[in-house]
Image: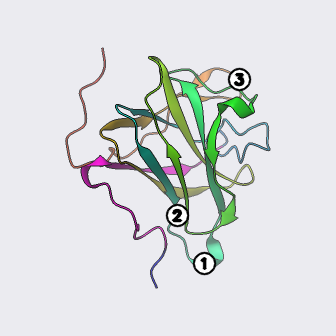
């Protein structure tokens, strides 16, 4: 039997995108939302162009004895605006449980949001301070969508630069930079 993160049982063809990321250093290892440091995790903005079901999968490629308790939460947010440390239930679209496993997955109805709004995908470890690498895969049955790093917050409250990532894989060249 293979690892859950190595082979997905879903496929949306060209409507799939993925990023390789990591939890590294104090600015990107905030832990789950039960900790006040939860916004200090990698964040990704998802903007769908049409309605449809989205599947988001977080995976780690670790031996069984080194698996981190991982999970993810999908929130409604604003493009380019850091998440505050106050989390309201109205922001939460869906979330997974946190457990030491190779992969966690959530499915949700992913409809276009008003201009300037986005879904913010926040993968994290359960406790703050744990470091590791992950892959985040997103599939959307309805059509094309954008998936890009979302701004994170430094402990000073000043926006932190997003971590350098491998290009988002979707079988086509990356879009040109926005003006």
Please report whichever mark, 3 or 2, sits nearer to the chain's N-terminal start.
2
Q: To which residue does mark 3 refer?
A: 156
**What label sits on residue 64 in the rendered view?**
1
Q: Which residues are magenta?
A: 4-25
Q: To which residue does mark 2 refer?
A: 60
Q: Residue at x 61, y 69 (%)?
A: 101
Q: Is residue 5 one of those drawn in magenta? A: yes
SS class of the residue under badge 3? Answer: loop
Q: Is residue 21 one of those drawn in magenta? A: yes
Quadrant position of the C terminus in the picture: top left
Q: Quadrant of residue 148?
A: top left
SS class of the residue under badge 2? Answer: loop
Which marked residue is nearer to the observer: mark 3 or mark 2? Answer: 2
Residue 52 location (% of width, % of height):
40, 42
Please report whichever mark, 3 or 1, sits nearer to the chain's N-terminal start.
1
CA–CA distance in space, label 3 to label 1:
36 Å
Closer-to-camera residue (140/120): 140
Relative side of 179 to 2, left or right: left
């Amino acid at each position: 039997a293979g690892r859950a993160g190595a082979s997905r049982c879903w496929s949306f063809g060209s409507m799939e995108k993925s990023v390789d990321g990591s939890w590294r250093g104090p600015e990107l290892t905030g832990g789950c939302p039960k900790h006040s440091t939860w916004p200090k995790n990698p964040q990704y903005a998802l903007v769908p162009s049409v309605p449809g079901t989205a599947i988001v999968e977080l995976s780690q490629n670790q031996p069984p004895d080194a698996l981190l308790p991982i999970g993810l939460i999908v929130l409604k947010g604003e493009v380019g605006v850091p998440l505050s440390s106050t989390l309201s239930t109205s922001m939460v679209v869906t979330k997974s449980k946190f457990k030491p496993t190779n992969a966690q997955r959530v499915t949700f109805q992913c409809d276009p949001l008003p201009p300037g709004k986005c879904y913010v995908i926040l993968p994290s470890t359960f406790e703050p301070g744990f470091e590791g690498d992950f892959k985040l895969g997103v599939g959307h049955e309805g059509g094309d969508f954008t998936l890009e790093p979302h701004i994170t917050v430094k402990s000073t409250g000043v926006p932190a630069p997003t971590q350098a990532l491998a290009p988002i894989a979707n079988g086509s060249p990356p879009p040109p930079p926005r003006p």
